[in-house]
Amino acid sequence: MVGHKHWARRTAAFVLLLPGVSGLLLFQLIPMVSSGYISLTDWDLLTEAEFVGLDNYVQVFQDEKSLMSIKNVFRFIIGYLPLVLVFGLLFAVLLNRKMRGVKLYRAIVFIPVITSWIAVSIVWKWILNGKSGLLNYVLSLAGIEGPVWLQDFFWAMPAVIMVTVWKDAGFVAIILLAGLQDISEDYYEAAHLDGAGSTYRFFNITLPLLTPALFFVITISLINAFQLFDQVMILTNGGPAGSTSTLVEQVYKNAFQNHKMGFAAAQSWVLFLIIFAVTYLQYQLQKRWVTYDR
């Protein structure tokens, strides 16, 4: 009888796990293994694949476009990450205050997050238009001649950063807001009794206890930044002169426009290894600055 119940529980567990495990195998593990094999071949989708070993990986680090795209991603991260954290934290602190209509304000801040990149990019292409764009019109009122944002070699990447920060700041704000609301009021009451001011409370209570949420948003934001693609394809298509080209955009073009599947797969694995290394480094460093309230 006991054996029958044990067998029934194991069967039920297997049935419940089967959909998830099947999805993991079909859509994650098998494509990963397949792309690993394809990266070792010269394959144009039409003819038989030819095994070339590590040649594609060597080419990735010899290809000027690949190297420029990797460099552009790091340029993007240097500009994007500090800005999205500052604006996200600012919004979170403001939305954490007790005021009328705060739920409406939270919804307004979050709207860009749930808006598709296609809609966002189309609107921002008009805003950033060099001749008839809203941004240059506003700048002209102050006597400033704005650049041709998306066609300028220097300003194209800052424009992409600006649009991405505008869209992602709401997501960061919501995560940090949850972190703020998880901080016990006892700390603030004790600090208040000791005569601590708001600035002291922010830098000595709020910020240290917010580090777990900050660590989470930094990790997610970095992974998303390395996979920068949608906004680049719609706003600049990687131009001008490759100044906004990214590794994911190069993977897409080599795979589906140039039909260099092996080379594109090798670029994908290089990107995966970069993300893995950066994420591993973050986990190692978080022991030094993340404070958990236990």
Image (spheres, helix red, strand yellow):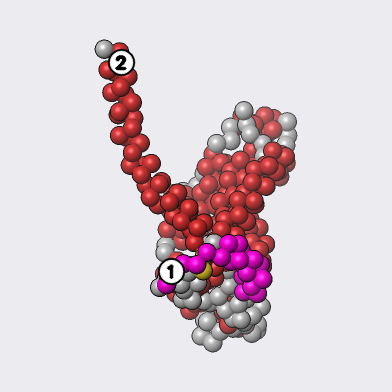
- Amino acid type at circle 2 is Gly
Question: Residue 158, can we see it?
Answer: no
Query: What is the number of the mark on residue 8?
Result: none
SS of the residue under disc 1? loop
- Which residue, given by chain and number where applicable, does mark 1 sit on? 48
Q: Position of residue 14 (x, y in %)?
A: 33, 32
- First reached walking from the N terminus: tag 1 or tag 2: 2
**Would you call the spot at circle 2 few (<14 residues within 10 Å), some (14-19), or many (20 or more)?**
few
Q: Is residue 76 above or below residue 281?
A: below
Residue at the spot 48% in from the left edge and 79% down from the top edge: 126
Q: Position of residue 185 (x, y in %)?
A: 59, 32
- Which residue, given by chain and number where applicable, does mark 2 sit on? 3
Query: Distance of mark 1 from mark 2, alpha carbons?
Result: 53 Å
SS of the residue under disc 2? helix
Location of residue 18 (image quadrant): top left
Nearer the observer: mark 1 or 2; the answer is 1
Q: Is residue 49 magenta?
A: yes
Q: Is residue 252 magenta?
A: no
Q: Nearer the viewer, residue 57 or 175?
A: 57
Which residues are drawn in magenta?
Answer: 47-66
